[in-house]
Image (spheres, grey):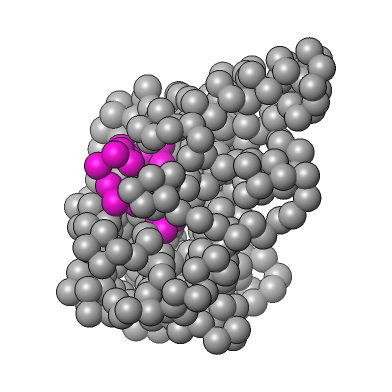
Amino acid sequence: MNTIYMDHHATTPLDSDVLDAMLPFLKGNFANPASQHASGNDVSKAVEQARSEIASSINTDPRSIIFTSGATESNNLAIHGVAAFYKEQGNHIITCKTEHPAVLDPCASLEKEGYEISRLAVDQYGMIDLDELRDAITDKTILISLMFANNEIGTIQDIKSIGDIAKEHKVFFHCDAAQAFGKIPIDLDLLGIDLMSISAHKIYGPKGIGALYLRRRNPRVRLEAMQLGGGHERGFRSGTLNVPGIIGFAKASEVAMMSMTQDSVHISKMRNHMQKSIMDSLDNVYLNGHPDRRLPGNLNLSFEDIDGYSLLAKLNGIDMSMGAACSSAISKPSHVLRAIGRSPELCQSGIRIGLGRANSSDEVDYVAQAIVKAVSELRESGNSVDRESCVYV
Ligand SMILES: *Cc1c(COP(=O)(O)O)cnc(C)c1O
């Protein structure tokens, strides 16, 4: 049997049109876009075309796009870059408990250097409280970093209101939009976002390429560069550009914009069907995340009396994950499930299903039935808690 892939929050398969767009730049068009000869100029033109494509997909100016290696690097550059540049103005950063580690860890490292970090709590659905955000702002606050949509439970924050609050208080707003970009509309003309991180491999593009949006006016955001060298990307990110990645990123973004409405209707329909069939067949199943303000493909469930690892182990041939993907490093229950108030047992029993473009209704039915069967069997046998080591993706 072929594997059924339902882990689209971790990464997505490469779209075939994206691969086709990339191939010429992996073969003949290999020149360095910074080179002054004709071949270099040709590649440079293609890169600038790609930059325009990505910028227009979020309704902004191409010059506000800095290419990076992905959302992790964009988050690090945004947070460390603003902290370093504006350190005379203040040392306070506001973020949230349910952020991706690529935001939480740079903040924790700044804390060790003497910055003050406020980590907002969330409600049972994963939403921050806007009044708490307002109250957290001081005259030392230089940055608010809050994600667009959560990678574990799919909850979509009220980004427009957060941006308005940031503007009111003249504080920069950085948004990790790795999960939201390409799946829900983002119009930077309407949202008060000053810096935004996006990644290609979450939208059926290649791995190892992403971007940081950096607002150029009203207000202009300055940054201290973190990676120094030849002055690429207007000095913000030195290093020879990942040309095939950039071309693929732009194509993936073009495809995502064209198919966004259709995808989100189709995928959320399948997700809702899956949720209903599992919850109708089993008792004591808990939905993690917001019932409505949620990414179309996200379904995060906790099953009472079930260990998530044992459940996933029983679901042979189906790729899904715990809130975090397993590897051999550290072991912790999901910080997101803890933040929404799940008991340690329910944190340990959470599984994250991530539906995507290529999933079919048949697969959804098959997986829903497999989950119901596995949970019933584990409950009958009394399953053992068997933790493994985890890293977050
Ligand atoms: C995947 C993800 C990241 C990391 O992105 P990379 O491009 O893999 O570095 C950061 N934040 C969120 C919310 C993500 O989902």
Q: At which x and y percent is residue 115?
A: 51, 82
Q: At which x and y percent is residue 377?
A: 42, 66
Q: Can residue 312 be seen in this view?
A: no
Q: Is residue 29 left or right of residue 96?
A: right
Q: In this view, does 372 lie to the left or right of 24?
A: left
- For the record, the magenta segment spans 174-193
Q: Residue furthest front?
A: 88
Q: At which x and y percent is residue 125?
A: 24, 67
Q: How many marks?
A: 0
Asked if 239 appears above or below 25 in the picture, the reply is below
Q: Is residue 136 magenta?
A: no
Q: At which x and y percent is residue 128?
A: 26, 69
Q: Is residue 72 left or right of residue 297?
A: right
349, 258: nearer the viewer: 258
Q: Is residue 136 visible?
A: yes
296, 239: nearer the viewer: 239
